[in-house]
Image: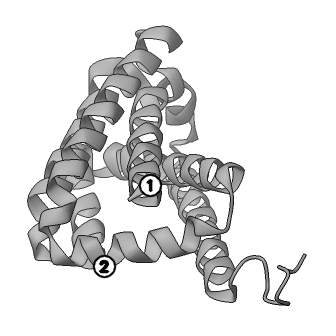
Amino acid sequence: MNAPDDQPATPPESRFLLAAGTILYGVMMLVALLWLWLRDRMEALPPAAVGTHGPWLASAIGLGVGWLGACALAIVNPRVARMRELEAVAKRSFQASGEMAAILFVTVGAIAEELFFRLAAQDAFGVTGSVAVAVLVNSYLAGWRWIPVSLLHALALSLIVQQGFGLLGSTTASAVMNYLNLRRIQCS
């Protein structure tokens, strides 16, 4: 569908970035599940999914941690030049994509990241290894000044899983934080 001036309704760069991100997240999910399968650890998935505290408490913890994370990002991101650049790209990418695309992208991203970092990596390397992998990946994308924020974020999500709130808690926290951060970026 084209806009009135015969321009594409969604700029090609935006569509490409969203498609590339979705493919990357799909690959992360497959790698996480393949890593578990190759290590004969697929049985780790069901008990890690919800955790030992049940879905309501896991979801509540996730909502609270996600909201706190979004508040922290609203304070920190404007002070880090590389994060301002990444926020500008996110704003452009999601500007014409619509609310449903943003929700789906954030949800798929949260599921993929938590399967990869909190299930596969944490199962293989423990909390310390999981946090280290997440910090390396996120700091590579955002720069060395992002290390303290990335460290706190990865540690909080890993502890959610370790303390029995499962992937539901960590995925909820990740999705809520990313969605609220994206909404803040779009409204700025």
Q: Quadrant of the C terminus?
A: bottom left
Name the residue at the front extreme.
Answer: 4
- In the rendered image, residue 85, in percent from the top left (x then y), is placed at 31, 79
The label on residue 187 is: 1
Task: State the residue in front, 114 or 128.
Answer: 114
**Residue type (three-letter) at the residue carrying disc 2:** Glu
Q: Vertical placement of 10 versus 100: above or below?
A: below
- In the rendered image, residue 31, in percent from the top left (x then y), is placed at 55, 63
**Residue type (three-letter) at the residue carrying disc 1:** Cys
The label on residue 40 is: none
- Per the image, the residue denoted by label 2 is 85
Q: Vertical placement of 16 versus 126: above or below?
A: below
Question: Is residue 87 something that shows in the picture?
Answer: yes
Q: Is residue 63 left or right of residue 65?
A: right
Q: Vertical placement of 94 versus 131: above or below?
A: below
Name the element at disc 1: helix
